[in-house]
């Protein structure tokens, strides 16, 4: 008679073969899209324990369905610069998965944007949005437009042109974009204004991250950064530790970074470094956040300018060196693959106890391995930075009700959501045999809700 062990081994072989086969189709169908391959690889490997335990997902070929976007839209964005010259950019919207709600996810304006980047972000977004427990599917968009050095007029003309095409694919119950790198309150305002002109109606729920005067939610600006810190706080609590008295390094100096620094400081941490795409500042007495906010949010200057106002601080060219600053807690909040294996090893050698990913996929697969092997508390992006999209979903709820909650009400809901995400990740990691591994836990918990919804909806 076959022993239980033999059944398990056979299932394990089938599950691994299935995952490898689907991964090969991902590479063949999406050549040269290395970031998308990386995001898929991490999720696929995490799901092997699910396929061993529940082979019906293999029978349903759920993975091959999930990794193929429902729809990929690519479009021309023509606009006129301040010199009167016609410029052309490429815009994207990837509507990845609508099994549990309308497509939901940000828009990124950065010269590095291409189909692979938007697919990696859209694929991650499916699982992240599922983890929030709210009814939102996964999507992402953007353009290979570089906002740096552009005038307000150029930003407006570009953004209006982008929306002039995008409007036909979105709507409050269809697809709800928001901000991401290079897209903040200013760009969302221009997008909303253009959408409203074309549609001829006030459909507030079509975009999130709106200004407070026309349907935005209090605490959406703070949500991603605050949420990341709430998530790390939960990880630390389980080890009897906290932010109080800790030294923290946060990369980036944009929306996520600034509010991660703010909440970490409120919880008693000393934040000693932050960066932008040119370099980083190190202020061993603790960064003055008011200066960073003014420089980056109001004046849109380089982070380098900080040292002119704070002579005790140092500025270094280049981004990766920031991880060689000794710290207890590292919060990568700039961009993908900003922590590689070498940087992870330096962080570990310097005694880092926790890493919380505010950015999307900021650690390479090798870097994640270094953290997990060295028992560093590791909060993966799709769990740790889910607070932003969670409050976006709360903005949609408020728009539907035509009511607004107070800052404290939204912040309390955000806090609760981050605690729940943490607990669900821990629980899934335990149940599927990888206690403490929140990468596996987040991927499994996010996957199950979407996969089950897809299956009951037929072959979709
Ligand atoms: P912002 O545009 O507000 O800020 C981005 C910051 O990262 C800036 O300081 C920017 O520097 C720096 N940066 C951008 N690209 C690079 C690069 N290639 N190398 C080094 N530094 C870089 O974006 P957000 O703060 O909104 O986004 C940051 C990260 O968080 C992204 O990964 C995004 O996907 C993720 N995220 C954002 C959410 C949100 O709600 N906004 C929600 C969840 C995740 P510079 O000033 O020089 O451009
Ligand atoms: O990556 C992300 O989760 C975001 N950029 C926020 C998406 C949103 O819809 O608020």
Image (spheres, rainbow, N blue to C red):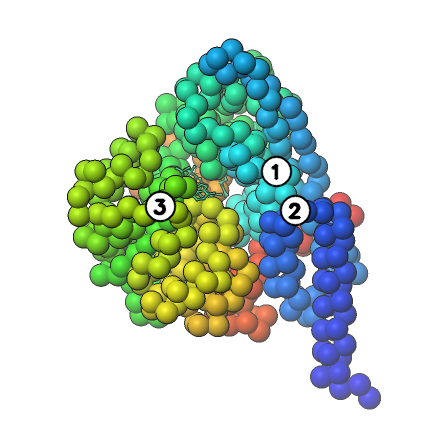
Q: Are marks 1 and 2 in contact (CB under 8 Å)?
A: yes
Q: Which mark is residue 317?
A: 3
Displayed-image quarter of ligand 1 = top left
Give how far apart the Cα atoms at labels 3 and 2 are.
Answer: 29 Å
Residue highlighted by disc 1 = 114
Residue 251 or 422: which is nearer the viewer?
Answer: 251
* Residue at screen point 62% across, 33% down: 93
Left or right: 131 as drawn, with respect to 10: left
Q: Is residue 258 above or below residue 446?
A: above
The one nearer the camera, 65 or 314, is 314
Mark 1 and mark 3 lie on one chain; the one further toward the N terminus is: 1
Q: CA distance from mark 1 to mark 2?
A: 9 Å
Task: Measuring from the top left, give residue 30's x and y in whole percent.
Answer: 71, 46
Mark 3 secondary-structure assignment: strand
Q: Decide: is 327 above or below 193.
A: below
Residue 320 in sight in this render: yes
Q: CA distance from mark 1 to mark 3?
A: 27 Å
Going from the N terminus, do you reach mark 1 or mark 2 first? 2
x, y percent for residue 360: 50, 48
Residue 261 vs 164, above or below: the answer is: below
Residue drawn at the location 40% of the way across and 60% of the way down = 355
């Amino acid at each position: 008679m076959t022993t239980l062990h033999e059944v398990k081994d056979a299932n394990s072989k089938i599950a691994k073969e299935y995952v490898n086969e689907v991964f090969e189709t991902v590479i063949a169908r999406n050549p040269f899209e290395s970031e998308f391959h990386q995001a898929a690889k991490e999720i696929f490997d995490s799901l092997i324990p699910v396929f061993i335990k529940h082979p019906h997902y293999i029978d349903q070929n759920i993975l091959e369905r999930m990794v193929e976007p429902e729809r990929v839209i690519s479009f021309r964005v023509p606009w006129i610069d301040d010199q009167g010259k016609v410029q052309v950019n490429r815009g994207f919207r990837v509507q990845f998965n609508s099994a549990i709600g309308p497509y939901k996810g940000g828009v990124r304006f950065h010269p590095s944007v291409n189909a692979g980047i938007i697919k990696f972000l859209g694929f991650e977004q499916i699982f992240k949005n599922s983890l929030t427990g709210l009814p939102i599917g996964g999507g992402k968009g953007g353009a290979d437009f570089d906002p740096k050095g552009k005038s307000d007029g150029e930003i407006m003309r570009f953004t209006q042109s982008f929306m002039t095409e995008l409007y036909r694919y979105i709507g409050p119950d269809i697809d709800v974009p928001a901000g991401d790198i290079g897209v903040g309150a200013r760009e969302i305002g221009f997008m909303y204004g253009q959408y409203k002109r074309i549609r001829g109606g006030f459909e507030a729920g079509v975009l999130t991250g709106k200004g407070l005067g026309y349907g935005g939610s209090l605490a959406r600006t703070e949500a991603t950064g605050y949420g990341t810190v709430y998530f790390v706080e939960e990880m630390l609590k389980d080890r009897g530790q906290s932010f109080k008295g800790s030294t923290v390094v946060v990369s980036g100096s944009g929306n996520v970074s600034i509010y991660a620094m703010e909440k970490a400081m409120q919880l008693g941490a000393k934040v000693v470094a932050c960066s932008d795409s040119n370099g980083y500042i190190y202020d061993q007495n603790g960064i003055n956040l008011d200066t960073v906010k003014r420089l980056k949010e109001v004046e849109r200057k380089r982070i380098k300018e900080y040292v002119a106002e704070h002579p005790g601080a140092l500025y270094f060219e280049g981004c990766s060196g920031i991880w060689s600053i000794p710290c207890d807690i590292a919060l990568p909040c700039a961009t993908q693959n900003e922590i590689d294996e070498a940087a992870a090893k330096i962080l570990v050698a310097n005694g880092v106890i926790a890493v919380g990913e505010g950015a999307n996929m900021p650690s390479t697969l090798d870097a994640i391995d270094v953290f997990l092997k060295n028992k560093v508390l590791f909060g993966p992006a799709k769990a740790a930075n889910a607070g932003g999209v969670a409050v976006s979903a709360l903005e949609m709820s408020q728009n539907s009700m035509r009511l607004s909650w107070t800052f404290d009400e939204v912040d309390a809901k955000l806090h609760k959501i981050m605690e729940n995400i943490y607990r669900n990740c821990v629980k899934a990691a335990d149940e599927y045999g990888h206690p403490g591994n929140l990468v596996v836990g987040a991927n499994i918990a996010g996957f199950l809700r979407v996969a089950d919804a897809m299956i009951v909806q037929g072959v979709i």
